[in-house]
Image: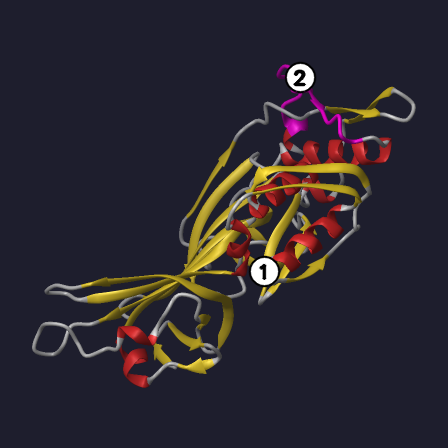
Amino acid sequence: MLSVKTGSFRILKNNSALPMSVMAAIQSVRVEQEINVPTMFSFTLNSVASGGGWQDINLDLFKPGDQITVFLGLDMTQQMVNGEITAIEPHFGEYSSVTIHGFDRLYRLQFGTRSRTYRDMNDSEIVAQLARSAGLTVRPEGNPGLRVGYVLQNNLSDYDFLLGRCEQLNYELQMDDTTLVFRPSAAGASATKSLNYPDDAGEISLILRLPTMGQEVSVKGYDVTSNRVLTATVSSGTAQGKMGGKQSGYQLAQDFPTSAMQLERPNIDTPEALQQVAAAQYQRHLNQFIEGRTSVLGDPGLVAGVNVKLSGLSPRFNGIYYITASVHRYDVNDGYRTDLKLRRSGI
């Protein structure tokens, strides 16, 4: 493990420590996380020999497909990603270097396109089937979902197909080590940490935008058995959707024109499933109500998919925020920092 005043890191290849000569050459480590996106990692080795030219580092030590586990922290390190090498980028010149890139195993779902029909299955079962085909274990969380008569995957990668399912249900995909997690959005759940301005975060940028869609969501489906059009309508959300606030973005926009919207889902044939979709779309269109970003001292606990509580701002902007993306970056000169993207759907 190499340490500086403000951070430390550890990297394993195929569950074994890297040679000390390689560890000593690592100049920077980066882990980028985002909701529903494969986590990316990279680390760069300084390959300049003391007298100039290329330092004798065996580039063949790394190959695509090698398992890489990255740990970051301050006093103690914490696992940030368990992934696989997908690219190797050497640079030969006055300042020679090599950067190793890779992703967690969610990336495996992006290979190729497929056409399939899923009949009488719920979404948890669909995700489990696709995970197995990519060599992944899966852990569905929350309600397993309602069974749907049929769902069509039309010439899409498994990843793009599952993103569409997540968008329809306001669900999320993420990796927990080597296990694929399929869960309802955790936005508005209990905060795992508090960040005070300016003590913990010296700069916080936020933007509040009134939502223009979703104040009332109607979804139409069709019951083939009874030959009837079915409709479900949602015009209010849950307390969790306000994220500890008193108003949602829709309530703040009451003096503006209505933002009601209609959707058609002809493949959905039960009122319960239509209601689930309508509720998910009502909340999903609130997700960009307040967005922001900040940078803090490196903290491996601040990852995409957890909530934090901001304070020291103003009554309107204090409260719970959802981390939608995080960048954990270690540099031998600057130490360990964490950049966050945030969102909030209530005030």
Which SS class for mark 2? loop
In the image, residue 314 above or below residue 60: above
Please state which amino acid type lies under the numbered disc 2. Answer: Thr
| Residue 227 shows in this picture | yes
In the image, residue 193 above or below residue 19: above
Q: Nearer the viewer, residue 35 or 19?
A: 19
Q: Residue 149: where, in percent of width, then height?
A: 81, 37
Q: Earlier in the sequence, mark 1 or mark 2?
A: 1
Q: Residue 109: where, in percent of width, then height?
A: 55, 52
Q: Residue 126: where, in percent of width, then height?
A: 71, 49
In the image, residue 98 above or below residue 206: below
Q: Quadrant of the C terminus?
A: top right
Which SS class for mark 1? strand
Left/right placement of residue 74 relative to residue 118 reads: left
Instruction: Give me the residue at 56% from left, 49% from top.
Output: 36
Left/right placement of residue 73 relative to residue 24 reads: right
On the image, numbered disc 2 is attached to which residue? 258
CA gap, disc 1 to disc 2? 38 Å
Instruction: Give me the residue at 28% from left, 83% from top.
Output: 21
Residues drawn in magenta = 250-268
On the image, numbered disc 1 is attached to which residue? 175
